[in-house]
Image (cartoon, rainbow, N blue to C red):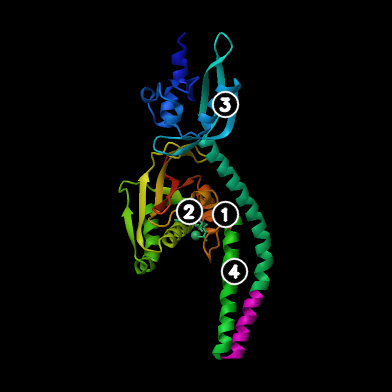
Amino acid sequence: MNFESVLAGLPDAVIAVDGALHVVFWNAAAEELTGRSARRAQGRVLKEILPTGSSLVRRLTETLATGEHRSEADGVLETVDSRTVPVSIVTAPLFARDGTVEAAVGVVRDVSRIRQLEDEVRRGETLAAAGRMAVGVAHEIRNPLGAIRGAVQLLARELGDDPRWREYTDVLTKEVDRVNRIIESLLDLGRPVQLRRAPLNLHQLFERVALLHEGTARARGISFVRRYDPSLPPILGDEDRLLQLFHNLVANAMDAMKQGGRLTLATRVSMNALYGKMDVGTGQRSMVEAQVADEGTGIPADVRAKIFDPFFTTKERGLGLGLALCHRIVEEHQGAIQVESAEGRGTAVTCFLPIARA
Ligand SMILES: Nc1ncnc2c1ncn2[C@@H]1O[C@H](COP(=O)(O)OP(=O)(O)O)[C@@H](O)[C@H]1O
Ligand SMILES: [Mg+2]
């Protein structure tokens, strides 16, 4: 039996180093995971290939020094194009005849898919909890709020046109309306909606959203760019909910471009490995990608994990419910939502939505 070919065929990256941390084995999965060929890795010191502080370097070094196993569930691996991939790592010593540690082997597993699913679950739980609470609270608040609004209007009428009082009553009305909008959004989030699905032309939806925003956008130095795939099949979705979805994404994109820029609406049939085909309850279905991309501020790495949380906002007057709702809507469609962002360069939000026919 050829052990080398067994190792080569493993889905996990297997990397072995000698006592001085020179790479002596680098299988196909390691090539794929790191983006570095075995030919270029063999014989080199691992620290020259991966950053010194990298989880794998650290664990292999420890194993060489102690002759003990090491494992790390939440490691990261840096790829050639300086992406970081979440990985789990296990290292083991290889002993020489005299019992000294002569080499160490590390098995590295790509866990990005698992992490992504964990995030999804966590997000779903927060949303469900927020939704349940919201519905309860919202109903209690709605009625007194209605009474306040009515009273303020009466007051405004009594006080007449005196600008001194008008200012106060205007503020009262405006703020009450704002609270009302928060409640409506919360109810939207909490309400289990019955989707009214129909075949839809995604480009028409995008155009309706663009029509509403393009005037304001132009005034702010933002131009809309369309990159539509002309052969895109109809999607299966709820028109109102999807309009809500795209409104929110376009609003966020515009908020991020205070200095102006291009806002791109793009569509295509998805070739994505993870989301190109998804189970929509009635079997696998091909997905299309509806993307809203901006050239705005981008999202800092430490903020990225929180943007879908209800009430998370970095804006002075933000509600922080937009993306939570977007996530909810995409989920209702058995789709997926993905955010790519580069700080200072912009953000692209991609929604994966099912096509109308299998
Ligand atoms: N296109 C974007 N560019 C930069 N940051 C964004 C973008 N979209 C969302 N964000 C970040 O995510 C946060 C949450 O967004 P959202 O849920 O829509 O709430 P809100 O817009 O009320 O702040 C925003 O406050 C912002 O920090
Ligand atoms: Mg928003």
Q: Position of residue 115 (x, y in %)?
A: 54, 38
The numbered mark, 4 or 1, whose residue comes first in the sequence reads 4
Disc 2 crowd rating (10 Å Cα; few below 14, some 14-19, many 20+) is some
The numbered mark, 4 or 3, whose residue comes first in the sequence reads 3
Q: Where is residue 305 in the image (x, y as percent from the top left)?
A: 54, 48
SS category of the residue bearing label 3? helix
The numbered mark, 2 or 4, whose residue comes first in the sequence reads 4
SS category of the residue bearing label 4? helix
Q: Residue 62 carries which label?
A: 3
Q: Residue 193 carries which label?
A: 1
The answer to whether residue 155 is seen in the rendering is: yes
Disc 4 residue type?
A: Asn
The numbered mark, 3 or 1, whose residue comes first in the sequence reads 3
| Residue at x 55%, y 62% (from the top left corner) | 319
Kindly indicate whether the residue at mark 4 contacts the one at mark 2 (C-beta within 8 angstroms): no
Kindly indicate whether the residue at mark 1 contacts the one at mark 2 (C-beta within 8 angstroms): yes
Q: Quadrant of the C terminus?
A: top left
Q: Looking at this view, is 331 or 231 the one in front?
A: 331
Seen as rendered, the residue at the extreme left is 230
Q: Can you tell which of label 4 and label 3 is closer to the viewer?
A: 3
Alpha carbon of mark 4 to alpha carbon of mark 3: how far? 58 Å
Q: Which mark is residue 238?
A: 2
SS category of the residue bearing label 2? loop
Q: Looking at this view, is 182 or 238 the one in front?
A: 182
Kindly indicate whether the residue at mark 2 contacts the one at mark 3 (C-beta within 8 angstroms): no
Per the image, is 152 magenta?
yes
Q: Residue 257 carries which label?
A: none
Disc 1 residue type?
A: Val
Q: What stretch is highlighted in magenta?
A: 146-160
The answer to whether residue 349 is seen in the rendering is: no
